[in-house]
Image (cartoon, rainbow, N blue to C red):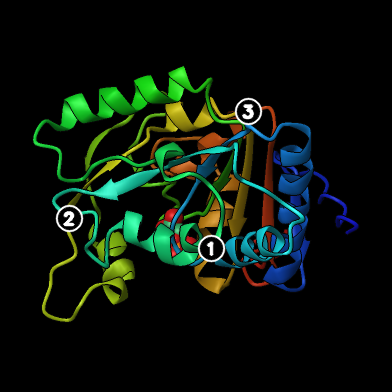
Amino acid sequence: MSRPAPLPQLPVPTRVVSDPRRAALALADELEALLSRRPEAVLGLATGHTPLLLYRELAERVRTGRVSLARATSFNLDEYVGLAADHPGSFRAFMARALFGEVDLPPERRHFLCGEARDARAECARYEASLSAAGGVDWQVLGIGRNAHIAFNEPGSPSDSRTRRVELCEETRAANRPDFPPDEEVPGEALTMGLGTILEARRLRVMAFGASKAAAVRAALLGPRRDEVPASHLRAHPDVELWLDVDAAMALSPNA
Ligand code: PGA
């Protein structure tokens, strides 16, 4: 598939598509090429609505034999503190529904932070060590929160932060409320890969769709680089691409 030309004068190569499906197809093409060259690639995976079309496309390509994840490894970005792995709101359960139930990635090479770990610090150290032992992430998919968070690195997260336990903003908890039964609280804490950890991935592919992301996208690209806008730190990465739909890009024009 041909790629839309990157917008000029932005600090990150940014592509604006008419339909999020076009971004999902382009990124699936890139993953397919990576996996055919390097079947044992290490993939960094994200949860949320943003990557769902990509995961659907990837599952379809695995189903039809175009792509295989049989020798790949994955690391998910984050997990809520205190949720059992089989809780429907857990990111482990999300990934089972969104991708892992339909692809040939061996379960022993799907890595997750354990939100039920008694010693969060030890759990985060274990995760960093597993990432290093795997040789780091080759290809990381990311979404952006409405408050410009990356994974669960909320505003105020330094660019050199490592995997750690964090408190979630009320805005984030409210955005994720629909993933939980009405009688249950969204957890207030999570374990997350740090911005410094994420920035070590060799390629970052970031997607943002919809008008609710427009302000965060504008702050990330056009405002100063600062900890209050975690997504602005993505600008430090040498191989990052941002894929937007028209609504998410609407605040980027000079007179927006
Ligand atoms: P979303 O979440 O993909 O559900 O919009 C993205 C995020 O909060 O990082």
Between 207 and 74, the residue placed more toward the observer is 74
Q: Position of residue 192 (x, y in %)?
A: 32, 40
The first of marks 1 and 3 along the sequence is 1
Say whether mark 3 is within 8 Å of ligand 1: no
Q: CA distance from mark 2 to mark 3?
A: 30 Å
- What residue is shown with label 2? 83
Taking the image as shown, residue 27 lies to the left or right of residue 194, namely right
Reply above or below: 154 against 203: below
Rate crowding at label 1 as few (under 14), some (14 to 19) or many (20 or more) other CA atoms within 10 Å: some
- What residue is shown with label 1? 102
- What residue is shown with label 3? 202
Q: Position of residue 237 (x, y in %)?
A: 62, 29
Q: Position of residue 156 (x, y in %)?
A: 32, 38
- Residue occupying the point 68% across, 35% down: 39
The answer to whether the residues at label 2 and label 1 have Cβ atoms under 8 Å apart is no
- Where is ligand 1, by quadrant? bottom left
User: Which residue extends farthest bottom?
Assistant: 182
Say whether mark 2 is within 8 Å of ligand 1: no
The answer to whether the residues at label 1 and label 3 have Cβ atoms under 8 Å apart is no
The first of marks 2 and 3 along the sequence is 2
Q: Is residue 192 visible?
A: yes
Rate crowding at label 3 as few (under 14), some (14 to 19) or many (20 or more) other CA atoms within 10 Å: some
